[in-house]
Image: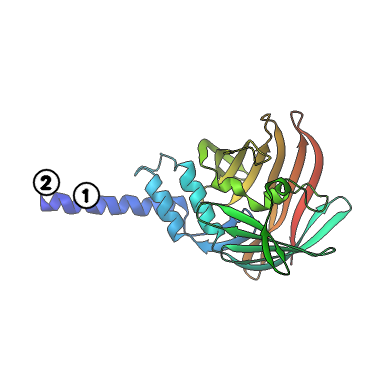
């Protein structure tokens, strides 16, 4: 190959890479954090790199499920937030304060006081109960317990399925006009209440738009979906997420809980 041909190939490669980044929309985008459900504008430099490595040059080969999950976890662990919110189910209203400093997230409840701390690691997450003397790890049996009588469990706060090793991309689907990757994740053991989970992740931002959890009879048991967002101090945050408990195998809604962030 001549020097002129080498330079021409290099220029063509740069043009294709630039076209990929511009067409993919990876410049500024909003992120709905899986565990805190917070949406915020971020720069996705590392996110772009991981996705670019997974894509073929023509942009038609999808990234692997583990590449997508790694990007979501990376975004998850970079936030700095301090918000008030509530869990609401019919007449039950459970206020909480949500704070995060990088990979350390705390949910603070009152009446009675309870502080739950989520620590995000590279390979796993850990949910602890904060006490006057320090922290103690949640027992696996307690993870399945509901929070203050709502349809949300402590396991749901931990989002351990983002670390499950068995995952695959099922395809693409739209959720509330957003083009999403649809993923299936399988539980590594019966410690989880879910045998497998379906996730819909916004292709342009890494936002978790919908989740479906299936019991060990492979029946749909719980569904999470983002309903609305709001702008606070020039940043986007979740306004409302709906969590539905279902009668497995019937699609009948047993309870409907709303996670809401207030200004």
- Location of residue 167 with respect to 72 vertically, above or below: above
Task: Determine whether, in the image, residue 32 is placed left or right of residue 205.
Answer: right
- Location of residue 28 with respect to 243 vertically, above or below: below
Query: Do we see residue 59 in this rendering?
Result: yes
- Location of residue 41 with respect to 3 vertically, above or below: below
- Which secondary structure, mark 2? loop
Q: Which residue is disc 2 drawn over?
A: 1
Q: Nearer the viewer, residue 99 or 144?
A: 144
Q: Which residue is disc 1 drawn over?
A: 9
Q: Nearer the viewer, residue 185 or 175?
A: 185
Query: Do we see residue 36 in this rendering?
Result: no
1 and 2 marks in contact (CB < 8 Å): yes
Q: Residue reaching furthest left?
A: 2
- Location of residue 114 with respect to 210 vertically, above or below: below
- Which secondary structure, mark 1? helix
Render colour scheme: rainbow
Which residue is depicted at the point 69% across and 31% down?
219
Q: Quadrant of the C terminus?
A: bottom right
Q: Position of residue 255 (x, y in %)?
A: 81, 42
């Amino acid at each position: 190959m001549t020097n002129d041909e080498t330079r021409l190939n290099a220029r063509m490669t740069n043009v294709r890479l630039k076209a990929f980044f511009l067409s993919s929309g990876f410049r500024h985008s909003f992120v709905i954090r899986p565990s805190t459900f917070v949406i915020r504008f971020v720069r996705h430099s590392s996110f772009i790199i991981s996705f670019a490595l997974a894509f073929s040059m023509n942009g038609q080969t999808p990234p692997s499920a583990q590449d997508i999950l790694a990007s979501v976890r990376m975004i998850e662990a970079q936030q700095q937030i301090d918000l008030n919110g509530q869990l609401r189910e019919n007449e039950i209203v459970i206020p909480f304060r949500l704070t995060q400093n990088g990979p350390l997230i705390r949910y603070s409840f009152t009446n009675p006081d309870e502080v739950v701390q989520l620590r995000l690691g590279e390979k796993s997450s850990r949910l602890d109960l904060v006490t006057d003397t320090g922290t103690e790890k949640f027992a696996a049996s307690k993870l399945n317990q509901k929070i203050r009588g709502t349809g949300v469990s402590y396991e749901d706060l931990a989002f351990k399925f983002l670390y499950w090793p068995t995952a695959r991309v099922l395809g693409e689907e739209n959720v509330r006009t957003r083009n999403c990757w649809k993923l299936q994740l399988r539980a590594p053991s019966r410690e989880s209440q879910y045998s497998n989970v379906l996730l819909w992740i916004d292709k342009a931002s890494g936002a978790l738009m919908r989740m479906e959890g299936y019991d060990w009879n492979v029946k749909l048991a719980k569904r999470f979906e983002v309903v609305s967002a709001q702008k606070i101090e020039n940043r986007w945050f979740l306004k409302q997420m709906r969590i539905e408990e279902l009668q497995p195998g019937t699609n009948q809604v047993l309870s409907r809980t709303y996670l809401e962030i207030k200004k």
